[in-house]
Image (spheres, rainbow, N blue to C red):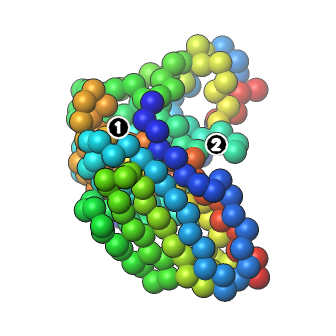
């Protein structure tokens, strides 16, 4: 089983706080790293697809960085708002070997932003 | 509208019965996936398929079966051999080997009664 780990498992912050979470993944056979947001009663939706070492992507108050050599990615949320409350998932598509094309998700980080 | 359709949204099954969950996509995606989510846990991969007539076991394939006879369709059968079938099931698709972003259906909540 491919190891895709996320931390922390859950996070409670106050409105206006900035926060960040981590996704670690195997550094071999790297193809891409995905971040998704999963809001209650909705389907997961992609935030970022990151492919290059050192990549940094931004969407509004949310940004992500990627280090493929050491196998980790950070997701940052600046000035959290209650509508940011969701589960944040990272996913790792396997680019080689017998698990070619397998898309493995981390356990997710549950973010709750309190007004 | 392009997307993934899962049906039904809720499903009740008696113990010992097989049941099939439907997943259809009109995104022209090659790759399709089935995941299971249990309370307090992440998404665990059941089966995945990169191309028609081919599929691979994921991490928790025991008690499940799939088929991929058409590009658009990837039905999942939960057999009576699955010990704990009550869960939330999500289907996803991606354009190529899971590299581009995955798109998800609305999910099916299966309850064994």
| Residue found 70% across the figure and 22% down from its top | B14
Answer left or right for B108 relative to B65. Answer: right
Residue B95 visible? The answer is: yes
Residue A3 spot, x, y in % from top left: 46, 39
Residue B17 visible? The answer is: no
Query: Seen from this angle, which residue lies furthest front?
Result: A70
From the image, which quarter does the N terminus of chain A lie in?
A: top left
Q: Residues within 10 Å of mark 2 (few under 14, many from 20)?
A: few
Residue A19 spot, x, y in % from top left: 60, 73
| Chain on which label 2 sits | B
Q: Residues within 10 Å of mark 1 (few under 14, many from 20)?
A: many
Quarter residue A59 falls in: bottom left
SS of the residue under disc 1: loop
Above-or-below relation of A108 to B37 = below
| Residue found 70% across the figure and 18% down from its top | B15
Q: Are marks 1 and 2 on the same chain?
A: no
From the image, which quarter does the C terminus of chain A lie in?
A: bottom right
Q: CA distance from mark 1 to mark 2?
A: 19 Å
Total marks placed = 2
Query: What residue would you read off at disc 1?
Result: A102
Along the line of sight, which residue is nearer the eye, B85 or A85?
A85
| Residue found 64% across the figure and 42% down from its top | B41
SS of the residue under disc 2: loop
Along the line of sight, which residue is nearer the eye, A86 or A6?
A6
Quarter residue B52 falls in: top left
The disc placed on residue B41 is 2
Residue A42 spot, x, y in % from top left: 57, 60
């Amino acid at each position: 089983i491919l190891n895709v780990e996320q931390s922390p498992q859950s996070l409670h912050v106050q409105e206006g706080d900035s926060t960040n979470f981590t996704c670690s993944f195997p550094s071999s056979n790297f193809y891409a790293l995905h971040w998704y947001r999963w809001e209650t009663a909705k389907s997961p939706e992609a935030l970022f697809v990151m492919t290059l070492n050192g990549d940094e992507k931004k969407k509004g108050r949310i940004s992500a960085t990627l280090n493929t050599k050491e196998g980790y990615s950070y997701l940052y949320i600046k000035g959290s708002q209650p509508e940011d409350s969701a589960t944040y998932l990272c996913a790792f598509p396997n680019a080689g070997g017998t698990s070619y094309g397998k898309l493995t998700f981390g356990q997710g980080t549950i973010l709750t932003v309190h007004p | 509208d392009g997307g993934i359709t899962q049906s039904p949204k809720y499903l009740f099954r008696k113990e010992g019965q097989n049941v099939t969950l439907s997943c259809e996509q009109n995104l022209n995606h090659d790759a399709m996936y089935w995941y299971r989510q249990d309370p307090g846990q992440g998404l665990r991969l059941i089966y995945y398929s990169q191309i028609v007539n081919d599929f691979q076991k994921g991490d928790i394939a025991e008690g499940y079966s799939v088929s991929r006879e058409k590009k658009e369709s990837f039905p999942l059968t939960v057999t009576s051999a699955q010990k704990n079938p009550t869960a939330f099931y999500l289907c996803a698709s991606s354009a190529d080997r899971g590299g581009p972003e995955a798109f998800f259906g609305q999910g099916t909540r299966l309850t064994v009664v």
